[in-house]
Amino acid sequence: MAPGLRWRCGHGQWETLPDALANPADHDAWYARDEQRRRQRDEEREQQHQEWAAERERWAQEPDPEPEPAPEAAPCERRKGPITGPPGEDAEFAPPEDGRHCPACRTDLRQQYPTLRQAVFGRRSLSK
């Protein structure tokens, strides 16, 4: 060990006495590092705001895209008509919509005689 070197707890190497007394972890060093981090954060935040403003400006200049047409409902599997039924038909008393049949077909299917399996095990809903 060379003369004049000191070991400080928490440090991984030997230090001279002036280096050991000049504590780099004191309040002044912490404030300097904190101020540097604050400036860097402020610069990044300002840069982000400028990028967002440029994006908003670009979006304001672009025309709105044309809305996509609504998808047409699939036709009834049995009659090939609209699932909602013919215009003017009242579907109030028809079974609930299954997405595959018009109100008349749903009523017909509900009123059919059950198969042997349905009679023994019960009717399953058609929507499954």
Image: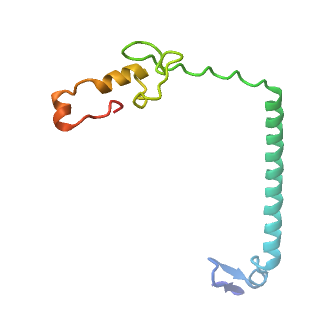
Relative vertical location of residue 85 with respect to residue 119 in this rendering, above or below: above
Residue at (63% x, 81% y) in the render: 10
Residue 121 location (% of width, % of height): 19, 37
**Residue 4 appears left or right of 32:** left
Residues 1 and 93: in front is 93
Residue at (84% x, 50% y) in the render: 46
Residue 97 location (% of width, % of height): 43, 29
The coloring applied to the image is rainbow
Relative vertical location of residue 33 with respect to residue 27 in this rendering, above or below: above
Task: Assign the C terminus to one quadrant of the image.
Answer: top left
Residue at (46% x, 20% y) in the render: 83
Q: How many marks are shown on the rendered structure?
A: 0
Residues 66 and 21: in front is 66
Residue at (29% x, 25% y) in the render: 111
Task: Assign the N terminus to one quadrant of the image.
Answer: bottom right
Residue 76 location (% of width, % of height): 42, 17
Q: Quadrant of residue 57?
A: top right
Q: Residue furthest top?
A: 80
Q: Quadrant of residue 104?
A: top left
**Residue 116 appears left or right of 125:** left
Residues 7 and 110: in front is 110
